[in-house]
Amino acid sequence: MFPKYFLFYICAMNSELLNILEKVAALYMKYGVKSITMDDVARELGISKKTLYQYVENKNELVEKVVDYVINLKDCSFKEIAEKKMNAIEKLIEVNMHIITSMKEYNPATEYDLKKYYPELYAKMHSIRRQRMYESIVANIKKGKEEGLYRKELKEEIIARLQVSRFMNMHEDELLSKNDIQRSEFIHELFIYHIRGIANEKGLNVLEETLKKINFNNYL
């Protein structure tokens, strides 16, 4: 089921192209980008290369469309979370659960291939991800302050930059393995660490009550 916001993105898109992008994104995530040829795509999707070339001129354009597809899909998922009627801490826990689910499908080979063979696309994706994450964290901290859940003296811009750096760079940290990054407990602890660092006493109580309501067996 696509997020409702994603419908605005796909309405103007041919349904067959959408199906192609969705399946190719899954192929790239499983096997990386470099090893998947246009022949592989046509064979896996059960379509002719002629049909495939009706939508893209070459592999470079296909990769670009897939990257845009993934960016928009993720953006829409987070917009849906942002619109839910939750307090700031509940929203962070919701984001936590979403990222845990997403990270189970993460393949570092995909990001490596983009960075090495499609540096402009990688830079675009990286920049958009970083900016959206920063804006989301700043907005969450401001909301938490207004709700009396976070410490008033917090400098949200500084905290947001620190948190973004922590997330964006952990894939390149030699102390962390792929298994570490993909472990649900690892992502969960990172979020809880962040919340405990910014919450006041009231916020910590809300955090504890929120955690009691969640069945982590569905995620961890």
Image: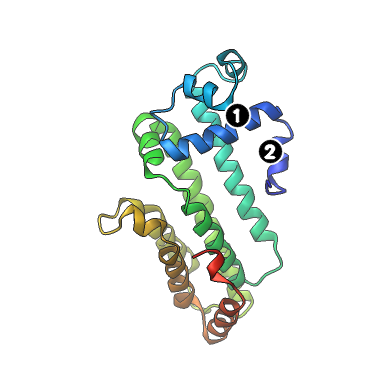
Q: Nearer the viewer, mark 1 or mark 2?
A: 1
The answer to whether residue 17 is visible is yes
Which of the two labelled residues, at mark 1 and mark 2, occupies the earlier sequence position?
A: 2
The answer to whether residue 165 is visible is no
Q: What residue sits right under mark 1 in the picture?
A: 20
Residue in the picture at 50% in, 44% down: 128
Position of residue 83 measured from the top left corner of the image (x, y, whole percent): 69, 60
Position of residue 18 measured from the top left corner of the image (x, y, whole percent): 65, 32
Q: How many marks?
A: 2
Query: Callout 2: helix, strand or loop?
Result: helix
Q: Amino acid at mark 1?
A: Ile
Residue in the picture at 25% in, 55% down: 174
Q: What residue sits right under mark 2 in the picture?
A: 9
Q: Amino acid at mark 2?
A: Tyr
Position of residue 158 measured from the top left corner of the image (x, y, whole percent): 43, 65
188 vs 47: above or below: below
The reply, left or right, for residue 67 in relation to residue 34 is right
Residue in the picture at 50% in, 50% down: 131
Q: How many C-alpha atoms fall within 10 Å of the one at disc 2: few (<14), some, or many (≥20)?
A: few
Q: Assess whether mark 2 and mark 1 are in contact (beta carbons under 8 angstroms).
A: no
Q: How many C-alpha atoms fall within 10 Å of the one at disc 1: few (<14), some, or many (≥20)?
A: many
